[in-house]
Image (spheres, rainbow, N blue to C red):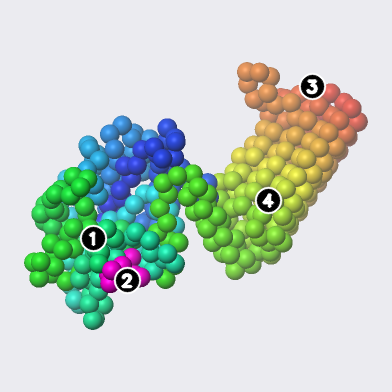
Amino acid sequence: MTGRQTAAIVLAAGLGTRMKSARPKVLHKVAGHPMVGHLMDRLAKLGVERTVYVVSPGMSEVGAFVAPAPTAIQDQPLGTGHAVLAARDALAGFSGDVLILYGDTPLLTTATMAAMVEACRAETDPAVVVLGFRPDDPGEYGRLVTGAHGELKSIVEYKDASDAERTIRLCNAGIMAAQSEKLFALLDQVDNDNAKGEYYLTDIIAIARGQGESCAVVELRNGDEVIGVNGRAELAAVEAIAQGRLRAAAMVAGATLTDPETVWFSHDTVLGQDVVIGPNVVFGPGVTVGDDVEIRAFSHIDGAAIEDGSLIGPFARLRPGARIGRDVHIGNFVEIKEALIETGAKVNHLSYVGDSRVGAGANIGAGTITCNYDGFFKSHTDIGAGAFIGSNTALVAPVKVGDGAIVGAGSVVAKDVAA
């Protein structure tokens, strides 16, 4: 089966009812990224050829986020089997292996997805592969009944399990992989003769086994990967695990976190080597940090780029569009927004610099403000290389201060200053 293609069906129809939210559940964020976005990123790394997202009617926000991937509408909430069937038309003509995932499990790794696909292509030729795990408390999870050689014999729901079956520790995580040639044929045989009147995806195991097909299990080592989010408390728990992963990865890659538990990363934070991060630092999306940068305590950085050797904080705020050059000092209670601070410049305390360029080696005194917004338009301030801006200066944009110019403390600068 080498050379087979892979597709994915991501069930993302949750309306966020238990989240008490108007936002679709899968668009709630973990590490600054919608939950379904984490799956999208990992499927891209896996090299999946086709992905279909199954949504409820009216979930245009999800469709817009996952585009250009197609969405399929599950017109009524009639169970997981019914949801997967909704993707049939979108996968018309596809031949290969199909992963069935859930949009509210953002911790699932690419490695686990790859293991599921690999198991689908084993010599035993399983029609269906199920992801299993061993939670500390199996509770009311469905149990995976396996044979002498580890093959999957059946999935037994807790309420239907015998006392002996309830002692089984291997539980159903709900995630599956199946051969496309068999998946929808099996689903067509699932009925809704149960208490809820729903079509259960898990029923395809019994149907496949009854037709003489084999089924297999991939067992997770870390059950955290399959934690699903149904409410705000679970969202917070998943966030904590995601942050633990990001902190560990940062330290393995050569960053020092002086108090790791208080540093909060975005999913896409990029750190260079020998970066030192103090306590209570928060990274929003879109941050890149060069080598030998120190970020001191209580700084907040969002959508910014910091080059090698710079010193940030404490209590600094870098907003989107902040570009910090090499060996720059950004000090306490300084806010930078949509501005370029060039090599060796210093903005050491109590200042706001927005929609600006600060030239190499310039010094911005305490309390300096770039007045970039007049109530209607934002204008640009240009401060030349080596310029010195005295404390408590207001620079009323659009304005230019030339290279090497000195502006006295307490000035209001509304006209260009020559070099």
Residue corresponding to mark 3:
414
Residue corresponding to mark 4:
281
Q: Disc 4 and disc 1: Cα gap in Å?
A: 50 Å
Q: Residue at x 65, y 46 (%)?
A: 301
Q: Nearer the viewer, mark 4 or mark 1?
A: 1
- Give the residue type that dot 2 points to: Ile
Q: Disc 4 and disc 3: Cα gap in Å?
A: 36 Å
Q: Residue at x 22, y 77 (%)?
A: 147
Q: Disc 2 and disc 3: Cα gap in Å?
A: 77 Å
Q: Disc 4 and disc 2: Cα gap in Å?
A: 44 Å
Q: Nearer the viewer, mark 2 or mark 1?
A: 1
The mark nearer the N terminus, 4 or 1, is: 1
Q: Is label 4 in a helix, a strand or a loop?
A: loop
- Give the residue type that dot 3 points to: Ala
The mark nearer the N terminus, 2 or 3, is: 2
Residue 364 showing in the rendered view = no
Q: Nearer the viewer, mark 4 or mark 3?
A: 4
